[in-house]
Image (spheres, grey):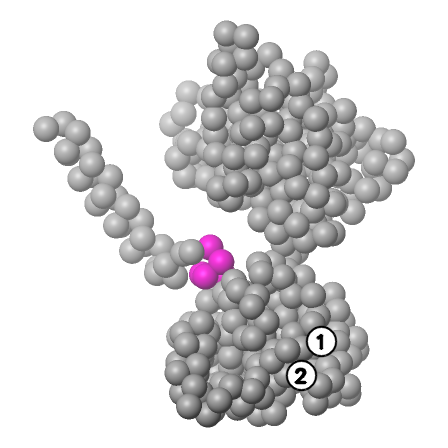
Amino acid sequence: MTDIERILPLWRELDSAGADYVLTTVVRVEGPSYRKPGAPMLITADGRRAGTVSGGCLEAEVASRAWWLTKDGPTVKRYSTAADDGDRPYGSGCGGAVYLLLERSTTARVLLRALDNAFTARSYLGVATIVEGPKTGVRAVAGVQSSSAESKDLRGLVDLAVQHGKSMECVLDEDGVPTRVWCDFRPARTGLWIFGAGDDAQPLARLAKELGWFVVVADGRSHLATRERFPLADRTRVLAIKDLTGQTADLLGPIQSHDVVVVMSHSFEQDSRVLAALLASGVRLSYLGVLGPQRRTRELLAEAAGISGLPFERVAEQVEEWLARLHAPTGLDLGADSPETVALSVLAEIQKVLARATALPLREVRAEQAVREAAATAASTV
């Protein structure tokens, strides 16, 4: 379960009761930090809290002072976790510092309402917030719900973050005063469509829900695609397999381009018909994986080409073209030998693709970064 999934139910309760609260958001980090900019935490007047802004070393301290710090309006505070920092250190000494924006419901409500709408609609969200300057807390929102902002420049920054699909920090000149703005781009909530409701799909659905994804399980076998077998899934669907062709992708459901798909029914007919519908739909999925050896996937694709009505002479070429778009076999090499470890392997590769990460051990990644930084420092001193 993600921070947003923990925060939204509590916020809805507080908002409906007209209760005040403090929203704390990481807006900047220096050095090593467990949480990155955008991480939120909601604090209630009776001491409850949801979400995290660190690995556990800052939350209690922030909550204890949140109401006093925000008595005059939104504010940004720096918290150091470096053991030798001149400021009061917290935790065991990660060696970095985080800047937290603390604000009451008066200004935070706009953001939380937009987060709620975006989460429900599975839509992207862009938020530009002034975090340093005379108008700290003023923001513009772009996505499923837009809000007005006093500054056209602020509105332009959030639109720019959405256009490029990434978060950024900017400095504006507001009436001659340097004003720091944090632009937070939040991509749409990932949807995982699992085509196949066998026993090995159950841990995949469970783990995906732990990641906060929207999970759909679909199968042509009504006794498998049930709520009882997949209680955590957002939806279960029974497919009309015989009706699936290359022109009937709509029968699969409202799959979006930012969604990910794993085909794993262990039924040759079902897998080939699902692939025919998916590949001919024109939707460029973020990830399309097929469980099983690549030899079987080639046979599935050849069958899918026939289902889609392709001439025989074009089948071989089409199979290679489609295969290049697939992750087949799906998953990373983790030595998986059980449904649970296979699920971990599959989700690990999906996360790697979505995050455009390397999947290398972090010690190797950090070592390479250190080498590059040392080289850059040496070059700058020449």
Q: Amino acid at mark 1?
A: Leu
Q: Which residues are magenta?
A: 351-355
Is the C-beta separation of discs 1 and 2 under 8 Å?
Answer: yes
Q: Which residue is mark 2?
A: 244
- Toward the right, the furthest residue is 17
Image coordinates for residue 314, horizontal then vertical, percent: 43, 86
The stretch drawn in magenta includes residue 360: no
Q: Is residue 85 above or below residue 235?
A: above
- Specify which label sits upstream in the sequence, 1 or 2: 2
Q: Residue at x 78, y 40 (%)?
A: 11
- Toward the top, the furthest residue is 176
Q: Which residue is mark 1?
A: 251
Q: Quadrant of residue 353?
A: bottom left
Say which of 260 and 316 sits in front.
316
Q: Left or right: 376 with respect to 315?
A: left
Q: Is residue 351 in view from this perspective?
A: yes
Q: Amino acid at mark 2?
A: Leu
Quadrant into which the C terminus falls = top left
Badge 1 marks a residue whose secondary structure is: helix
Q: Left or right: 11 with respect to 377?
A: right
Q: Is residue 295 in view from this perspective?
A: no
Q: Categorize mark 2 by other alpha carbons within 10 Å: few (<14), some (14-19), many (20+).
A: many
Say which of 103 and 277 sits in front.
277
Q: Left or right: 20 with respect to 261?
A: right
Q: Is residue 165 above or below residue 157?
A: below
- Toward the left, the furthest residue is 382
Quadrant into which the N terminus falls = bottom right
Image coordinates for residue 29, horizontal then vertical, percent: 46, 33
Q: Residue at x 51, y 9 (%)?
A: 177
Residue 50 tag number: none
Predominant secondary structure in magenta?
helix
Q: Residue at x 48, y 34 (%)?
A: 168
